[in-house]
Amino acid sequence: MKRTTLGLAAAAIAGLSLAVPATILAAPASAAAPDPGPETCLQGYVWREARPSDLVCVTPEVRTRTAQENRTKAARWTDGAYGPHTCLTGLVWREAFTGDDVCVSPELRDETLDANKTSSDRKVLARLWISTYRPNGPGTIPRIQVNGDHYNFGTVSIVFRFNNGQIHKSGYVKAVANADYAGGSFGKKLDLLYCSGSGKPNGYVQAYDLKSGRASARVPVNVGCATY
């Protein structure tokens, strides 16, 4: 997926309001509730579970159908050119994973392979990156824009912290549909100076998907400067 500046925000805001839920404000992410992990499906999707370790995200209907295919697989096998698990005429192996010899129609195998290739687009990967913009034109002090994709649609919390865990700024953005990005995405212009600084960044920004509890990776950033 693209990782460029998202043009979803209307106008620069005066900063992020300090209105993030207490569970997020109380401590750095490491002390918050356990993150459900990168295999978390976006709302409306579930793990396919063609086998216990199959964590491809699909609709509930596809998972139900997959379980039914597993239960009745023996009825679609015959002893033939590929051994006792040769498919009946007109059917092919499903190939949800290497060695998956459940027999389905060619159309369902194509659907299965496509789900394998696109599963990450249906997961809460909580990607976050920052870019800059110059509200007063070229040559002026740049401000920070936060960008993200692979979130659930709806509210995402954004928290800027110093490296000691102290919160600098925090607030909310809304993740919405955008044809060029997977899941819910956002691009929010903030009235926060982009502090170029030198050496190691003095802080980081992190995003929290409120529907799933997923947190983004920490993106290093220099914050809190009075001038550029």
Image: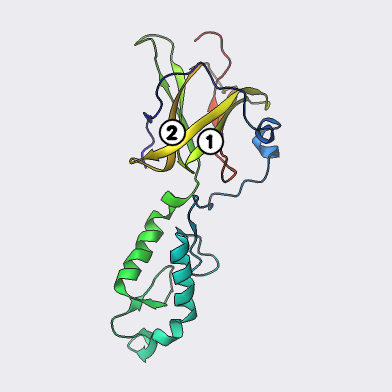
Figure check: 18 above or below 227: below
The picture places residue 123, in percent across and down from the top left corner, at 48, 50
178 or 141, nearer to the observer: 178
Figure check: 132 above or below 106: above
Q: Is residue 154 left or right of residue 21?
A: left
The picture places residue 221, in percent across and down from the top left corner, at 53, 24
Ranked by sequence position, the earlier of labels 2 and 1 is: 1
Figure check: 137 above or below 112: above
The kind of residue on which mark 1 rests is Val
Numbered circle sitting on residue 85: none
Q: Tag 1's secondary structure?
A: strand
State how far apart marks 2 and 1 are (Cα). Answer: 9 Å
Name which residue lies at 44% across and 18% down: 12
**Residue 89 appears in view:** yes
Q: Is residue 212 left or right of residue 146?
A: right
- Label 2: which residue? 186
Q: Tag 2's secondary structure?
A: strand
Tag 1: Cα neighbours inside 10 Å, few (<14), some, or many (≥20)?
A: many
**Residue 195 appears in view:** no
The picture places residue 24, in percent across and down from the top left corner, at 65, 34
38 or 63, nearer to the observer: 63
Quadrant (top left, top right, bottom left, bottom right) of the N terminus:
top left
Tag 2: Cα neighbours inside 10 Å, few (<14), some, or many (≥20)?
A: many
The kind of residue on which mark 2 rests is Phe
Q: Is residue 153 left or right of residue 161?
A: left
Query: In which quadrant of the rendered view does residue 214 lie?
Result: top right
221 or 12, nearer to the observer: 12
Numbered circle sitting on residue 156: 1
The picture places residue 224, in percent across and down from the top left corner, at 58, 15
Q: Are marks 2 and 1 in contact (CB under 8 Å)?
A: yes
